[in-house]
Amino acid sequence: MKWIITGLSMLLSVAGAQAAGCGGTQGLPDWARAGTYRGTLGPLPVSLSLDPKGESRYFYEGRSLDLFLETGRAGNQLVLQESVRRELGGDPVVTGCFTLMPAPGGLKGTWQAPGAARPQEVTLTPLDAGRLPLRLPLSPGLSALRRDDPLAFLKLNRPWVTLTGGRAVREPLSGVTYPRVPGASGALNAALQDRQLRHAADALDCRALLPEAAQKDPQEGYTLRAAITLSNARLLSLREDVDYYCGGAHPDNWTQGVILERDTGRAVPLTTLFPKLSAARQKTLYLSGVKTKVEAECLDVLREDADEFTAHLSAAGVNLTPSDLPHVVSACAETVTLPYAALRGDANLNSPLVKTLYPK
């Protein structure tokens, strides 16, 4: 998902460069360095990520949606041009101009909206996200987010909402809800939290890319449906379905199967359980099972284009869903269940994990 978001934001940046700008020119002052900053714009708290070679962005901490910035210079001043789209199909318009200089303890300067009578003062200090207290249980994904994307960490590092007797948790900013297993090991809960973190970050990124008119529309943006499909003594499996529209040419969707070891929370590759279930054999078994479920046109598409599959487990068997179909034929991506009995010859029957799928 992240590559889609990055690509769309680059398109917005290029389009914004064609609008009436902030008076800067290409290039950067010699002192400009990548970093994350936190401070105030006028009376409002903001956080800003400066990436002179890539994507710069900031957000008002009371709103938590990123605004994208183009970098430039005016003499020795750093100029950051803020652009947004008002409506679907519309071109980006410049909505603000930062002019910043290094100062003791960080950066200082101004932000001014086009046509505003006077600028607002901006004061920013470097942010060391590693020193921020954790509001969520420590997990590998949370640590990675704090290190690699401090702005997303600032938004998501807050108490989440436990639902339905501990069987689901909702992240409040994005609204993304993800299953939990009451009484599960700390490692498994960490793995589930980390998957939710990735979805929540993508959901916020997606909504930030929508035009202003669509950002509050619940029908737009990023929707996750995640459900536990198998839970036994050693394995937990889930299916994730995502529908998203981030302001590009068309909506899109994808499905992801997840198989986790219950004690450790580690992801379990399908071929660890079924070593003989190679990609080619998956396709052969999939096509055999799908031919009674789809029309002839879709069957032709699946024969030609379905070469990669995502898998989740259920009580009935291994469930395969094509994961590489072009968008225009994605509706052909039916899920096929391969019964465990039919896969006995493909399975590692000596594995304690597999034995839970073949009870005596």
Image: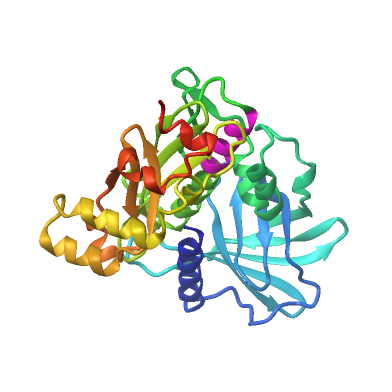
Q: Quadrant of residue 227 in the image?
A: top left
Which residue ends up furthest to the top in the rendered image? 165
Which residue ends up furthest to the left in the rendered image? 296
Q: Quadrant of the C terminus?
A: top left
Q: Specify whether 33 is left or right of 332.
A: right
Residue 268 or 66: which is nearer the viewer?
268
**9 inside magenta stretch:** no
Provide the major secondary structure of the magenta segment.
helix
111 vs 242: above or below? below
Q: Quadrant of residue 156 in the image?
A: top right
The residue shown at (60%, 29%) is 159
140 vs 21: above or below? above
Residue 330 visible (yes or no) = yes
The residue shown at (67%, 43%) is 140
Q: Quadrant of residue 319 in the image?
A: top left
Residue 143 percent location from the top left of the image? 70, 45
Q: Specify whether 97 is left or right of 207.
A: right
Residue 194 percent location from the top left of the image? 58, 41
183 vs 217: above or below? above
Q: How many marks?
A: 0
Residue 177 visible (yes or no) = no
Instruction: Give the residues drawn in magenta, as a range.
Output: 186-196
The residue shown at (44%, 51%) is 207
Residue 261 or 217: which is nearer the viewer?
261
Which residue ends up furthest to the right in the rendered image? 104
135 vs 303: above or below? above
Colour style of the rendered protein structure: rainbow
Residue 113 or 30: which is nearer the viewer?
30
The residue shown at (44%, 68%) is 92
Residue 139 percent location from the top left of the image? 66, 38
